[in-house]
Image: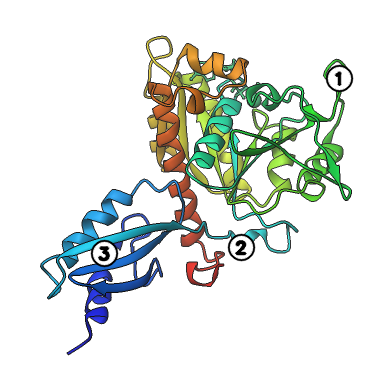
Amino acid sequence: MSSIHEQVMAALSTVIEPELHRDIVSLNMVRDLSVEGGTAKFTIVLTTPACPLKNVFQERCEAVLVGKVAGITAVDIQWDAQVPTDKKMFGRLDVPIRSIVAIASGKGGVGKSTVATNLAVALAEAGARVGLIDADILNPNLPMMTGLSAGHPRVVDNKMLPIEAYGVKVMSTGFITDPSKPLILRGPMLHSAIRQFFTDVEWGELDYMIVDLPPGTGDAPLSLAQSFPLTGVVIVTQPQDVAVSDALRSAAMFETLSVPVLGIVENMAGDFFGSGGGETLAERLKVPFLGRVPLNAEVRKGGDYGRPVVAYQPETDAGQAFLALAQQVAARVSVVMLQSADVIPLNVIG
Ligand SMILES: Nc1ncnc2c1ncn2[C@@H]1O[C@H](COP(=O)(O)OP(=O)(O)OP(=O)(O)O)[C@@H](O)[C@H]1O
Ligand SMILES: [Mg+2]
């Protein structure tokens, strides 16, 4: 007869991680099992602190243990999270960053910077270590959107320190250039400027680096997308048709670069623009639809005043939409990393 520990682990190995399609024991997500009285106590190590599936795991673990394994009457789960490291980082980056997610769009003004900011803040609120790079070098918006317009990064040991807002470490050319003078940078200079955001900035350890790209499929976004070992890209679109066809071109560009499209976000949904374009696009590209953010004056004001709606009005429809979006994006990052042969398995990361 096997020990109670073995029986509990055997039962837990029938619980399947719904997105990775593998059981939670072979994924090494179950740790520190102890059985006391009738209670099986263990830790589940999630692949992101912003996991949308906690309740699902709780229910499924209870379902296979309570009354199914002799002697177990209760389950006590502790939660922990370790974001896996995208192996593409090795040799490319000299900094401990586990994943890089770009925010892109086919046309300008659809809400990339707004999505990037609120996504970064939501991930940080969930407990992740998050960086945010303004890769819109010529037209930096993130200082305003994060309330850091007056910010100047400190330099320590020849490295710039990112400036923190809402728990997110932010870097933008807006911090180091004079906004009244035009910044003229082309091709290779753009490329090297953005690389310096990695090499010359002291980020510390990060779970997610969010990169706000300039719009479109021209030189600048292309060069920028090639500057980073991107884990994946989130494409922001508006509900109406024109934006959708531009977004198709944007997705095609990332496909050419072998960057996985994590999914589509439809921004500014509502009476004015309608809704549904994002889902249509996701279907055409055969990628997940990650969520819809309503057109909402509070979102715009939040951007203008540097008060992201997800931090200031999390209870509003838009706030809730961004929180849910962050969970979906985090889950997709985990899936893309763990499904790729390029990933370090969960059990060997520290
Ligand atoms: N869901 C929304 N509801 C209302 N206003 C929004 C919403 N999303 C973004 N906005 C507003 O729309 C404008 C454009 O958004 P944003 O700057 O994020 O777009 P962008 O795609 O980054 O633009 P660009 O292509 O110029 O970089 C901003 O004023 C922003 O506050
Ligand atoms: Mg922008």
Q: On the image, which quarter does residue 162 sit in?
A: top right
- Tag 3 secondary structure: loop
Q: Is residue 167 visible?
A: yes
Q: Nearer the viewer, residue 317 or 76?
A: 76
Q: Position of residue 239 (x, y in %)?
A: 44, 21
Q: Is mark 1 within 8 Å of ligand 1?
A: no
What residue is disc 3 on? 15
In this picture, residue 229 sits left or right of residue 45: right
Q: CA distance from mark 3 to mark 1?
A: 57 Å
Q: Residue at x 26, y 64 (%)?
A: 15
Q: Nearer the viewer, residue 300 or 258?
A: 300
**Which sits earlier in the primary sequence, circle 2 or circle 3?**
3
- Classify mark 1: residues with Cα within 10 Å, few (<14), some (14-19) or many (20+): few
Q: Quadrant of the N terminus?
A: bottom left
Q: Residue at x 56, y 37 (%)?
A: 120
- Classify mark 2: residues with Cα within 10 Å, few (<14), some (14-19) or many (20+): some
